[in-house]
Amino acid sequence: MAPRADLGSAQAPTSAVTSRDGGDLLLDVLREWGADHFFGCPGSTEVPILDACVGRDTPRFVLVPHEGVAVAAADGYARATGRPGVVTLHANVGLANAVSHAHAARMSRVPVVLLNIIKQRSILSHGAFTVAPDHQEMVEQYTKWAWTTLRAEELREDLDEAFRLALQPPCGPVYLGIPQDVLEQPATNEAGSIYPRTVKPARCDSRPAADAVAVAADLLAGCRFPLIVAGGAAAPPDAFPLVQELAQVLGAGVCCENRVSLDYNGYPTHDAHYLGPYAPAHPAVPEADVILAVGTRLFVEFLPPTQPWVPPGVQLIHLHDEAKDIGRLYPPAVALMGSIALGLADLLDALRSGTDLSPETRQRRDETVTRLRSARAERVSAELAAIATTHPIKVGRLMQALGAVATEQTTFVVDAATSHDQAVDYLPRPDGMSFHAAATSGNLGWGMGAALGIKLGAPGRSVVAVLGDGVFMFGMPALWVAARHSLPVVFVVINNGMYAAVKAGLLRRNGRAAAAGAFPGTDISGVDHVLTARGLGVDGVRVSDPEELEGVLALAVAAGRPFLVEVMIDPDDVGSLKR
Amino acid sequence: MAPRADLGSAQAPTSAVTSRDGGDLLLDVLREWGADHFFGCPGSTEVPILDACVGRDTPRFVLVPHEGVAVAAADGYARATGRPGVVTLHANVGLANAVSHAHAARMSRVPVVLLNIIKQRSILSHGAFTVAPDHQEMVEQYTKWAWTTLRAEELREDLDEAFRLALQPPCGPVYLGIPQDVLEQPATNEAGSIYPRTVKPARCDSRPAADAVAVAADLLAGCRFPLIVAGGAAAPPDAFPLVQELAQVLGAGVCCENRVSLDYNGYPTHDAHYLGPYAPAHPAVPEADVILAVGTRLFVEFLPPTQPWVPPGVQLIHLHDEAKDIGRLYPPAVALMGSIALGLADLLDALRSGTDLSPETRQRRDETVTRLRSARAERVSAELAAIATTHPIKVGRLMQALGAVATEQTTFVVDAATSHDQAVDYLPRPDGMSFHAAATSGNLGWGMGAALGIKLGAPGRSVVAVLGDGVFMFGMPALWVAARHSLPVVFVVINNGMYAAVKAGLLRRNGRAAAAGAFPGTDISGVDHVLTARGLGVDGVRVSDPEELEGVLALAVAAGRPFLVEVMIDPDDVGSLKR
C-alpha cells in the first residue's frame, strides 16, 4: 500500500519501516498454517503485527475488546474450521485475562495458539511496565507447550513449533511469548534454518492393539446388552458416523456425556439408538453388562460421587486417544488406546468378520433399546407438557422452543451453568457441529466469544448462543464484536436473575439459607439485557410469554444480523438438585 | 436467625446444619481482622460461607458478578480503609479471572486476601470439574504467600497467617486455597492451638541507619538544589505531611511519579514546592545536583530508555521500604532502607539539629522553585487555554473540568491508559486519598471495581472514576454493583472510540500504518455507554460540548446516586508520543 502523501507530514513522515520484519513473518506463518483470522485486544507491544496488517487481506485481525472473549472466539474459530485459533496478547496483563479460557481450550482440546507479545528484551528484567516475574508460569499448566522466543533468529522455528504442537492430536492450546523487539527486527532468518519446514504436523495416528480389539469385539457381541457412552472426541466427521454404525451393528444403546463433560456432540440425538445423557441412575445402566466408552474421560466429577459411575460387575471397554485417562478412576476390562476413528473402524471390522449376532440376541437388544427410548420419550414429553404454558417460563420450555426452531445447520453454543442439564437433555443435535460447550472447564463467559468464532469459521451454520444471565456479565464485549462485523449470531439470555447453581448448592446443603428462604450471593436481577445489548450495538427483544417463544426465536434466527433474545425465566427453576 | 416454619416444607426441611462449621469460623476471622465487607462472584463451592452469612450483618458479602471486578473492589476497599480487602473465589475458574487484578494489587502493594474455595479433597486429584492441576501456580508470583489448607484443624491458623502477611508492610496480596469440605467440617480447632492468636501483624518497622541519615542530611543541606521525587509509598497519613515539611525545610522542588508509576498521591499538588510529574526531560532535573527519591521504585519503564533517568553526576538518595528496589537500576549515593515515615522523621531531625541553610542557599533554592513552578503554571495555562472550547473535546479540557468540580474530599480513581498522562499533570490532589490508580500494573478495568470498594470503605469521599472507553469494556459489571447498592460513584468515560495507546504506538513506529493513515486494531467506536449503563441500572448522560462539561460533572457529583458521564473526546488526541 502506497503512503498517502497528504497524511505524511503532520504525524506520519515517510515510513521508517520498509524492510520485512518479524511482524510480517508472523502473519505469513499464520496464513501458512491456515489461520485466516486471528483475534486480540491489542496494546502497544503488538504494534509490529498491526502495522504488518496494513495492506493485507489475510490473515484478518479481529479486534475483540477483552482477552478472555478473544480466546473464546479463537477457540470457536478452531472448532469450526479445524485450523488453529490464534490470539495475540498484550504482555502479562493481556495474558492474565486469557488464562480462564486457555483452561477451557485445554479441557476441550482446542488448538488455540496464544502469542503473547511481551516488552523489549532490554527491559524485561527491570520490572518494567506490564512485565511479569514469570509470564509462562501463568498459563503453563493449561498448555501443551509454553516457550519464549529469545532471538529473532528462532522466531519462525518457534512459531512453527507452536502450531505443530497445537494441531497434533490430541489438540490443545500452546503459548509463545515473543519480545516486541524481536518482532521489530528484520526477518533475516527465513532461508537459513538447517531444519526442513513443515506447515502441518506429522500424522501420528495410532491404532489400538489388534488383540485388544478382538477381545472387545467378542465382549460386545456376546454380552446381554452393550451400552455405548459416546464422548466429545467422537464428534469429528471421521469418527461421528462410525459410532452410529457400531450401535447399529451391535443393537446397542447410546448415551452422550453429561452436562459437565459434553463439550462436543458425539452422537446424533435423532438416532434410534440414542438414550440421552449418561448417569449412574440412567435406566439403561442396570440393563448393561458391557459399557463401551468412546472418546471420553470417564468422568468429570462435579460432586464427590456416592456410588461408582461404572457399576461393579459391568465390563468396561474404553476407547480413547489419551492414555492418561484410560483407567484413571474406572479400570477397563479392555483398553483401546489410539485414534478414535481408527479404533472404531477396527472394532467394526472385527465385528463384521466375526460371528453375526444371533437373532435372539439382536431381538433382545432391539427391544431393550426401543423400551428405553420410549420411556425416555414419554418422560421428556410429560416434562415438557407440564410446563408448556407455565408462567414464568421454565428452562425446559425454552429448550423445547430452541429445538423447534433448529435446523440441520444450527449450532448451539451453550454456556449456562444450571440450565446446561436441560440443554443436554432436550436440544436436538444431528451432527458433530450441532453443539459446542466448554462444560468440562466450568468457566463462565466462554459461549459469547466462542459463538463469534464459530460463525466466522463456519458462516453456513446458524449459530445460537444459549447463555445464562451470569454468563452474560462475562461476555458483553462479544456483542460489540458481533455488531461491528455484522455477525448474525443469536444470543439467547436465560434471565432468571440469579446464580441458580449457587441457590441449588444452598438448597442441597439444607442449612440456614434453606431454612430462612434467604439465599445470599445469588441475586443478580435488575439487568435489562436488551438495553445493554443495544448500548453495545446489538438489537434485541425480551420475551416473558411462553407462547411467544418459538415466534420470536424464529424471527431472531431469520434476522440475518446479530440479535439478542432475553427470556424471562422462573428464578425457582434451579434444575435438579440431585444431578 | 430462627428457621421460618412456613418455608420449611417445600424446598427446605428443618436445617441439617446446626453446628458451627468452617464457614462460620471464616466469617469470624474476617470480622476480627477488620474486613467488614468482602467481595466475590460465587459458585457452589462457596456455599458454606454464604450459608454462614444468613442472620449476620458483619462481614457483609458484596456480590460482584465478575471476579476481576471483585478483586479490584477489594483492592479499593483496602486502600480506603487500611484494612484487608477480601475476595472469595470459585475454584480455579474464579481464580483465573482474578489473576489480572491480583497483579495490580501486588504492584500497588495492597493487602488483598484471595480466599479460593476449591473442590472437596476427595476429588481434587481426579481432574474434577473446575479443578486445576496446580491452582497456587496461577497466582503465586503475584502474592506474598500462597498456600492451601489441608485439614480443618489448620483453617484458623492458615487464615490468620494470610491476614498477617497481607497486612505486614510492605502490604500485598496473599492467596489461600480452601477445600469446600474443610469449610463444611465442624470448627473444632478453635481453642486447641498451642500458638497464641493475634489479629494484627507484629510491628516490624525499621529505621534507616543513623549514619546514612546523617550523610543524606548533609548532602541535602549542602547541595545546590535538591529535587524530591515523592512516590506512592509516601501517601499514607503518617508519611504524607512529612515530605511537605521536608521540602519546606530544604527549599526543595518536589515531583510526583509519572503516569506508569503513580498509584497513590505522595504530595499535595497545591503545595508551593510541587513541580509536576518527574521525567528526565523535566526542567527541574538540570537544576538538581541531589535527587531524594521517597517511597518509589525508580523506575517503572514503559519503553527502553534513551537516556538515564537519574542524570550522571546527580547524587541519588533513595529512601524506601523494599531493599530489592534500592539500587536496582540507579545505585544511590545514600541508601535509606526502612519505614518511609520513620526515615522522613529521622531526616527532618537530622536537618533540624544540623546547620541551618545559609540565607543565600535558601534564597537560591526558593527562587529556583518559584521559577520552575511559574514556568509549569504558564505551560499548563497555555495548554488549557488553547483547548478551552475546542470541538471535539480534548483530554486536557476534561481533566481541567474534573479539577474544577473537585473538592478536598474528592477521590479520583484513574484507569485510562493514554489519558493518564494528562490526569497526572492536571488533576488536583490535596491528600493521600485524592488519587488512586493501578498504573504500575497496566491492566485495564481495575478502576471501575476499585471505585466501588473505595466508596464502600470511605463513604465520606466523593468518588469519581476516570475511565477510558477501552477500560469500560473490562469493568461493566461494576455498574450493576453500583446500582444494586446505590453507591454514588461518578463514572466518567473518555469516549474517543479507540485504543489511543495503540494508535500512539503505531505513530511512534512510523511505519505502514502511519504512512497509510490506517490504524488496525485501534477502532473501538460505536458503543453507547449511557445506554449500556442504563441496561445495567445506572443512569447517565453524554457530553459533546466543552462548555457543558463543568455543569454536567457538578450535577453528577451532586446526584447522590451512581451516575455515568460519557464524554465524547477527540480521537486524534492520543497524548504525547514521546512520553
Image: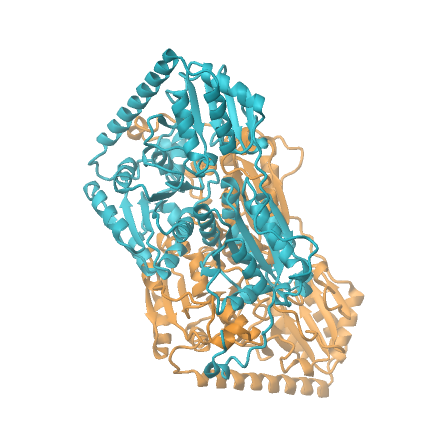
Chain colours: A orange, B cyan
The residue furthest top is B360
Horizontal arrangement in the rendering, residue B34 relative to residue A162 (left or right): left
Q: Position of residue B357 (x, y in %)?
A: 41, 15
Measured as percent of width and height from the top left, residue B68 is found at 48, 52
Front-most of A88 and A153?
A88
* Residue B502: quadrant of the picture: top left
Task: State which quarter of the image contains the C terminus of chain B.
Answer: top left
Q: What residue lies at 34% left-to-right and 72% top-to-bottom?
A: A543
Instruction: State whether residue A86 appears in this view.
Output: no
Find residue B14 and report its horizontal and vertical position in percent: 55, 81
Task: Give the residue at x 37% y 61%.
Answer: B484
Q: Nearer the viewer, residue A97 or B205?
A: B205
Quarter where residue A266 is shown: bottom right
Which residue: 40% across, 16% down?
B287
Residue at the extreme right: A211
Relative image position of residue A533 (x, y in whole percent): 35, 59
Is residue A249 depicted above or below B29 in this figure?
below
Q: Is B499 or A314 nearer to us in this picture?
A: B499
* Residue B109 visible from this viewpoint: yes
Against B367, residue B201 (above or below) is: below
Residue B117 vs residue B158, the one in the foreground: B158
Left or right, B470 with respect to B322, comes to left
Figure disc tally: 0
Judged from this view, the residue extending furthest toward the front is B353
The answer to whether residue B166 is left or right of residue B537 is right
